[in-house]
Image (cartoon, helix red, strand yellow):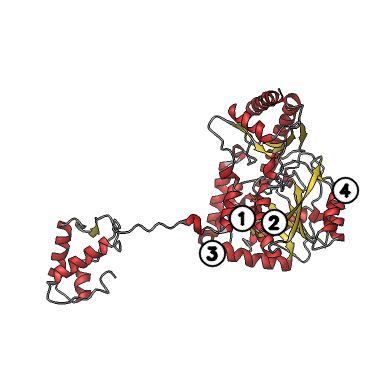
C-alpha cells in the first residue's frame, strides 16, 4: 500500500510529513493523475497516527491542487506528472540489430509506392470482403462462444485447437494426403509456418531453392534467416526442371520451396506431370520440399491437380503449408503445417517459444464455421466470383495489353511481361494517371531490372478493371514513343 515504506521522523508535525511525502510521490511520477489515495482511516491505521493528522494533510494537498477529494468516493491525484531535469534520448538507430534493419529494408509496405485515394489499385491480392457473410460469421462466432464458453478465453495449446486440428486432418486426407506418421500444427498463416520451418531446419548460409520469381514474403524471410537463396528461373510461369536439376547437382541444397497452385506472382498452376517430375528430382537429391498450398482451393476448373504432398504418399519428404488467408478470412490469421510427426513436434516447441499459440477464440470460431458447412458454400461462391473476374481481366488484357505476355490460370491476379520496358517506369507513368500495381522485381531473388508486373483484381469492380487496363495501355504507348 502507498506509504507502507514511509517512516515518520524528527519533530516536524506529522500532517506536514505526510503531505510532503505525497507531494514527493506525485512530483516524481510514482502517483499518476487519477489514481486513488488510501483513505485517511487506512493511513492512520498503517502509520499508527491520529486520523485528524491525515485529514489535515489531505486538506492541505487539496488546497495546493495536488489532489481532489470527491465526497463518498475518496481522494484522487489531480496533478499531472511532468518529469524535470535531463532529457534521456536513446539513439535507437544506432542500437537496431542487423535483423531489424533488414526487416525494414525489405518491408514493401513501407518502401513501395502507396495507394492514394481515388487510385485504381491492382496492388492487392487480398480477398474481396464483399464476399464475407457477416450474418453467418456472427452466428458461428456466437455459437462457438456459447458452446465452449469461458474456456475460449484461457490459454490453449501451441499445436492448436484440437477440434480444428482434427477437422484439418480429415480435410487434408480428403485432398489425398496420406497422414501416416504425420501430424498437423496450426500457425499464424503461411508466414509464421514458413518462418518456423526455416527456424527448425536451416542455419545461416544454408542453400534453399525457390522458384524465381516467388512470393515476396518468402524471399524476405529467407533473407532474414540469412540463407543462400538459389532461384530457379521460370519459363511460361513454371519452374524450368532442367535448370532445377543443374542447381540441385551443383549445390548442397537444404530445402526447396514451391508454390504449385496459382503461383504468386505468375498465377500459373503447375501441371501434374511436372509435380511428379520435380518430386522425383528432389527425391534423387534428398532435398525435402516445402509446398505452399495457399491458393489450392480456388481451382477454377473441375479437374483437380493433386498437391505434391498427396503425390508423396507415405513418404515424409513434403512439408505442406496451408492457409485460410486467400480462400477465406486473412484477418483471423490461421494457417497449418502437415509434416512428419517428429518434425511437427519440433515446430510446436518453436511456435510455443515465439507466441505460445494462436488465438483460441479465432480457432474455435473458424472450426464452427468449417464444421457447419459454411466454408463449402463460401468456396463455391468465391470460386465463381473470382473465376468471372479472372476471365474478365484476361479479356481486358487481350484487348488492351496485347503487347504483353500474360500469365496466370486463375487465382486473384495475373502476371504480365512487357515488351522490353522496365516495369517501374511503367508504374511511375501509371501512378501519374491514378493507377497502381506491383512491379515484378519485388518477386525476384536477384536485383536485375524486370519488365514484369502483377495485376491483382480480386477487390476491384469490373469497370475499374477495364478502366485501369486502358490507362496502362496508354502509358505503355507513351513509353514506346
Ligand atoms: C504464395 C503465398 N503463400 C501464402 C500466402 C498467405 O500468407 P498468410 O497465410 O501469412 O497470410 C500468400 C499471400 O499473399 C502468398 O502469396
According to the image, label 4 marks what residue?
A: 273
Label 2 belongs to which residue? 168
Q: Quadrant of the N terminus?
A: bottom left
Q: Nearer the viewer, residue 169 or 247?
A: 247
- How far apart marks 2 and 4 lie (CA) works out to 26 Å
Q: Which residue is mark 3?
A: 155
Query: Which mark is first along the chain, 2 or 1?
Result: 2
- Count residues near mark 4 (Cα–Cα under 10 Å), then give few for <14, some for 14-19, many for 20+: few
Q: Nearer the viewer, residue 71 or 419?
A: 419
Residue under numbered circle 1: 188
Marks 4 & 1, CB-CB < 8 Å contact: no
Q: Tell me if the residue at label 1 has its CB under 8 Å from ligand 1.
A: yes
Q: Is residue 33 left or right of residue 114?
A: left
Nearer the observer: mark 1 or 3; the answer is 1
Asked which quadrant contains residue 399, the reply is top right
Residue 176 visible in the shown view: no
Could you tell me residue 231's position as x and y percent? 76, 50
First in sequence: mark 2 vs mark 4: 2
Amino acid at each position: 500500500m502507498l506509504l507502507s515504506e514511509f517512516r515518520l521522523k524528527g519533530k516536524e508535525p506529522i500532517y506536514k510529513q505526510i503531505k510532503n511525502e505525497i507531494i514527493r510521490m506525485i512530483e516524481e511520477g510514482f502517483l499518476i493523475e487519477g489514481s486513488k489515495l488510501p483513505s485517511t482511516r487506512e493511513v492512520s491505521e498503517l502509520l499508527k497516527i491520529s486520523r485528524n493528522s491525515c485529514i489535515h494533510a489531505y486538506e492541505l494537498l487539496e488546497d495546493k491542487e495536488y489532489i481532489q477529494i470527491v465526497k463518498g468516493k475518496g481522494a484522487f491525484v489531480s496533478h499531472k506528472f511532468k518529469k524535470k531535469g535531463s532529457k534521456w534520448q536513446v539513439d535507437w538507430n544506432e542500437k537496431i540489430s542487423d535483423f531489424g534493419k533488414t526487416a525494414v529494408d525489405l518491408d514493401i509496405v513501407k518502401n513501395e509506392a502507396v495507394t492514394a485515394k481515388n487510385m485504381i489499385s491492382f496492388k492487392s491480392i487480398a480477398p474481396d470482403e464483399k464476399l464475407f457473410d457477416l450474418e453467418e460469421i456472427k452466428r458461428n462466432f456466437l455459437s462457438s462462444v456459447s458452446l465452449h464458453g469461458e474456456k475460449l478465453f484461457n490459454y490453449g495449446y501451441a499445436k492448436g485447437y484440437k477440434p480444428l486440428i482434427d477437422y484439418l486432418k480429415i480435410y487434408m486426407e480428403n485432398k489425398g494426403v496420406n497422414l501416416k506418421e504425420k501430424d498437423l500444427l496450426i500457425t499464424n498463416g503461411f508466414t509464421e509456418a514458413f518462418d518456423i520451418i526455416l527456424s527448425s531446419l536451416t542455419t545461416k548460409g544454408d542453400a534453399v531453392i525457390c522458384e524465381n520469381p516467388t512470393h515476396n514474403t518468402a524471399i524476405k524471410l529467407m533473407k532474414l534467416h540469412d540463407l543462400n537463396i538459389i532461384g530457379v528461373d521460370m519459363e511460361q510461369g513454371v519452374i524450368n526442371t532442367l535448370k532445377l536439376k543443374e542447381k540441385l547437382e551443383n549445390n548442397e541444397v537444404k530445402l526447396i520451396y514451391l508454390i504449385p497452385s496459382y503461383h504468386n506472382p505468375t498465377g500459373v498452376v503447375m501441371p501434374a506431370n511436372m509435380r511428379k517430375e520435380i518430386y522425383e528430382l528432389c527425391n534423387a537429391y534428398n532435398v525435402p520440399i516445402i509446398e505452399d498450398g495457399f491458393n489450392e482451393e480456388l481451382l477454377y476448373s473441375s479437374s483437380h491437380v493433386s498437391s505434391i504432398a498427396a503425390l508423396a504418399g507415405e513418404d515424409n519428404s513434403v512439408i505442406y503449408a496451408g492457409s485460410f488467408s486467400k480462400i477465406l478470412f486473412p484477418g483471423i490469421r490461421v494457417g497449418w503445417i502437415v509434416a512428419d510427426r517428429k518434425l511437427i513436434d519440433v515446430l510446436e516447441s518453436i511456435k510455443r517459444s515465439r507466441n505460445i499459440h494462436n488465438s483460441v477464440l479465432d480457432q474455435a470460431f473458424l472450426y464452427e464455421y468449417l464444421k457447419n458447412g459454411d466454408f463449402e458454400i463460401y468456396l463455391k461462391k468465391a470460386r465463381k466470383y473470382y473465376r468471372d473476374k479472372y476471365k474478365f481481366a484476361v479479356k481486358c488484357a487481350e484487348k488492351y495489353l496485347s503487347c504483353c505476355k500474360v500469365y496466370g490460370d486463375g487465382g486473384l491476379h495475373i502476371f504480365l511481361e512487357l515488351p522490353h520496358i522496365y516495369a517501374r517506369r511503367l508504374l511511375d507513368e501509371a501512378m501519374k494517371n491514378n493507377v497502381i500495381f506491383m512491379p515484378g522485381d519485388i518477386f525476384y531473388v536477384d536485383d536485375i531490372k524486370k519488365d514484369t508486373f502483377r495485376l491483382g483484381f480480386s477487390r476491384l469492380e469490373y469497370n475499374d478493371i477495364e478502366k485501369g487496363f486502358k490507362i496502362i495501355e496508354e502509358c505503355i504507348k507513351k513509353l514506346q514513343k
